[in-house]
Image: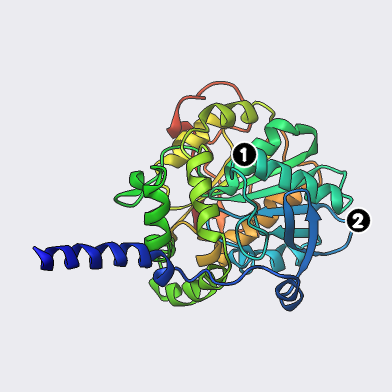
Amino acid sequence: MRNKFYLWCLIGAALIAAPFVMDSESEPITNEVRKSVPGSFVKLPDGFVHYELSGLPESDLVVLVPGLTSPIYIWRELPRALLAAGFQVLRYDLFGRGFSDRPYVDYDQNLFDRQLVGLLRKLGSEAPVHLVGLSMGGPVVFEFARRHSQRVASMTLIDPAGFPVNLPPGAGLIRVPLLGDYLFRVLGERILLAETARSVFDKKLVPDLQRKFRVQLRYEGYKRAVLSTMRHMPLGEMKNTYKRVGSLQRPTLVVWGREDQIIDFENSKKIRAALRQPQFLGVPAAGHLPHYERPDLVNPVIVEFLEQAWHGEGGALGWSLDARSRFRRNSSWPARGAGGDEGNEDARGEDEID
């Protein structure tokens, strides 16, 4: 009897100690930390935001909005391609990620919209901007467009959330109060690193991705922020918002990795239907980060789309990729805003590799 008592005491002690032993978040983000990292910081009501702004101020501004778990490194070569094309580029860490603060608030649409509005205001940006959203960045972009349509010049979505996603086994338990907090504090790092590995088709990229990803895990509040986002952001329930924003007829490009294991490629059809025939690029041999895995294919298409939107050629009449591109447009794809076949996926076509 006494042995059983000691056993249960050991189990209880292990359960209590586990969050502290297995939790790598050991440092606050201090002014010293901010001074040691590249980029700049701006103070907003919810906390400091880490950002990098490059390019000529008189150029059109492209804003890169990252996803659920990743900071600004996730854009890889895309910023350089945009700068070479003459754009001004703003990339930033969402609250709770990278080197931005981890405020004690609900991580919901209001927070991320407040952050983007506040950041643009602090930087003195008043003209319409080109928004590029990756994964959860898609809902952030579309909520911004819904609330501030006059501030949007164009939208590019890369494997966006908004419809049901492929969650790992047991993900439902994480949303349960207290139990989920405990489990995510103990197992969250392992879960997030596994999801990072699932995000790419080319597994040779995994070690470097995980090495970069681990940096933000050192700082207090990261897992708390991700968990709060999973509980408060409608990541699989954005159909109505997508339809509403699609009716604005802003130039829109959707890019999707065909081997995406995070948000299934089949979701691209639902989003294209909701958005009323956006420009679309399906990327072969790429997972949830097609711009990261296939910059040679994806970046030229994004740059060309933005150039045409910049010069007013990407509105309701649509656009096509010219002979410089490695892609061709399906001749059966109706121009953006054309009548008929709105519910017919086959009529839309898509850009394909030559």
> Percent position (x, y) of residue 144?
69, 38
Q: Regarding mark 2 in the picture, which secondary structure is present there?
A: loop
Q: Is residue 233 left or right of residue 301?
A: left
Up-down relation of residue 340 to residue 49 (above or below): above
Amino acid residing under circle 2: Glu
Amino acid residing under circle 1: Gln
Whether residue 35 appears in this view of the structure is yes
Label 1 crowd (10 A; few <14 / some 14-19 / many >=20): some
Image quadrant where residue 337 sits: top right
277 or 146: nearer the eye? 146
> Percent position (x, y) of residue 256?
49, 50
Query: How far is the residue under mark 2 from the one under mark 1?
Result: 30 Å
> Percent position (x, y) of residue 174?
38, 48
Mark 1 — residue?
A: 109
Mark closer to the observer (2, 1): 1
218 or 251: nearer the eye? 218
Up-down relation of residue 113 to residue 227 (above or below): above
> Percent position (x, y) of residue 66?
61, 55
Image quadrant where residue 108 sits: top right
Residue 49, disc: none
Residue occupying image coordinates x 54% and y 36%: 333
Mark 2 — residue?
A: 58
Residue occupying image coordinates x 50% and y 43%: 161
For the view shown, which residue lies furthest in the front direction? Answer: 2
